[in-house]
Image: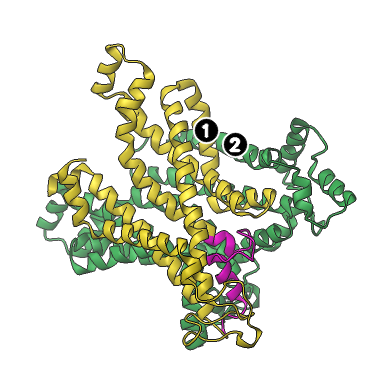
Chain colours: A green, B yellow
Amino acid sequence: MIDYVARRTLATIPVLLLVAIIVFSLLYLAPGDPAAVLAGDQATAEEIARIRATLGLDQSFLTRFFQWGGGILRGDLGVSVFSGKPVTTLIAQRLEPTIALTFMSLFFAVLIALPLGVLAAWKADSWLDKGAMGFAVLGFSVPVFVLAYCLIFIFSVQLKLFPIQGYKPIAAGFGPFLSHMILPSFGLGLLNAALIARTTRAAMLEVLRQDYIRTAQAKGLSTARVLIGHALKNAAIPIVTIIGISFAMLISGVVVTETVFNIPGVGRLVVDAILRRDYPVIQGVILLFSLTYVVVNLLVDLSYVLLDPRIKL
Amino acid sequence: MKSAQLALIASRPGILFGAGLMVAMALVAIAAPWLAPIDPQSIAPFDRLQGPGGHYWFGTDQIGRDVYSRTLYGARVSLIVGCAVAVTSISIGLLLGLLSGFIPRLDAVLMRVMDGMMAIPSILLAISLIALTGPSLRNIIIAITIAEVPRVTRLVRGLVVGLRGQLFVEAARASGTTVPVILYRHIIPNLLAPLLVQASYVFAAGVMTEAILSFIGAGVPPETPSWGNIIAEGRTVFQLAPHIVLFPSLVLSIMVLAVNALGDGLRDAFDPRFLEKK
């Protein structure tokens, strides 16, 4: 088991290295002069030269890559072209709302998806199943900002239950924090629930066909125990896998949701950075999000050992 | 195509709904100049933020432009991006997937690069490309294509590796058929159905990503009416005039829904398991 954990963990290193190389090479692969594009239309020659120097574009590719890569290993992501502050500082300042939004969305997604998928599989081909899967198709198709505006319109503008936008840190009190976070995380969670619910249903259908489910029913166990104790437990691996894969979607959703609700998180930071053409910030945020994605999927892989004791490869 | 498959396609409402709506949307996009009652760029300062109804079917925005006309023109951007991304991603993915499936030495390198690219959330990969090349329709198509190619490549490579081991391919090899002929006669025909399904999903992803990029300000230039742009502009006046956000959002969602339904329908129609059941 230790062997499996070590092997999976080590396997993420080349992926992370490649992500770093890709993110870094984009600057060099882009056609034209990226310094000129980043400086904008009204930039003077000095400004372009300054950006070129900040990004290290005046040095050779390899020199620059090792400098940059060495910096990352020391936790230095470079300096923002716009504000002159270190990128790590900028990201750290905005981490709290993003972490809160991600976890709460994931919470809502699982809370909605698991019961929906389990019930849909249990009552396969019933109206409940069709309704749940109809919802899943909708979830794939409605862009996250569209759902967000619908929620704002109903719950904030009409019913006045929640603030329309903005963010209150946890330090300012749990009540205000929660009232600002419920709509954004519910919206994002609802859309993510679609994919998870669909996979849960498929995995449950597969398991419910097995002999040991019939045995469990024959033993006279309650439906709830059969469904949750026997079936869901054995369907856990595909479900956990899809939660990991859908994490990329969740990250993209976080960027958009923070924009809609004006939440000062890392997603908002990257959107502002696009408008200001602040490439070091964009680079830093992409690296952070990709790292998170890779780590989440590593955890998913490692969780297999706990979910299925047969995996001791 | 077998008649059983044709019958199944006809029996799947998703395919008819999806294909029908796509054709209708394409006609709207082409005919936008004749269908739009008002020039999408024309400004009417006295008619700012009008609600839907009367002269302005979908109301007006904060500088008095007709939201209905702009939404009609927005279909053009979405369809161009969707089609272009689907065609280029599938073509490049097919090429890379075939190369990867047939040249083992290239396979190892190419698949690791694809792994790396897939670890970067696609919206963020597109964002960084746009930031470096500047927002324009062409750059958006390129950026979304680059983000979509790894998935198609993986799909093709997986299918090719599976097909290569099949008896009919081995028999063709043994009888001295050259690789190009094997590709043309045995491999590619077997890839068409899954690629067609994948193309519709890539199309949907292209439309969705373009809208998201435009919405966050990394999309087509603001003066071009695209659904994402109209929604982004309506954002600031959402409480006063929710209709600006509502109508393009509705059209966008229906469009993506239709393409996804088409993809799901095709997937079921091509799946031999469904044929057996019927």
Residues marked 1 and 2 touching at CB (< 8 Å):
yes
Vertical placement of residue B219 versus A68, above or below: below
Please say whether residue B225 is one of the residues in the magenta stretch.
yes
Q: Secondary structure at mark 2?
A: helix
Q: Quadrant of the N terminus of chain B?
A: top left
Q: Chain of mark 2?
A: A
Q: Which mark is residue B270?
A: none
Q: Chain of mark 1?
A: B
Q: Pointer 2: what residue?
A: A18
Q: Percent position (x, y) of residue B243? A: 50, 80
Which span of residues is magenta-colored?
A: B211-239
| In the foreground, A140 or A45 | A45
Please say whether residue B156 is one of the residues in the magenta stretch.
no
| In the foreground, B218 or A306 | B218
Q: Percent position (x, y) of residue B41? A: 61, 72
Query: Which of the 4 image quadrants contains residue B185?
Result: top left
Query: Which residue type does callout 2 highlight?
Result: Leu
Q: Pointer 1: what residue?
A: B112
Q: Secondary structure at mark 1?
A: helix
Tell which residue pokes out farthest to the left in this image.
Answer: A218
Query: Which residue type does callout 1 highlight?
Result: Arg
Residue A313 seen by the camera:
no
Binning the other alpha carbons within 10 Å of mark 1 as few (below 14), some (14 to 19) or many (20 upward) gives some
Q: Percent position (x, y) of residue B198? A: 38, 46
Establish whether labels 1 and 2 are both on one chain.
no
The residue at 33%/41% (across/down) is B194
| In the foreground, B72 or A88 | B72
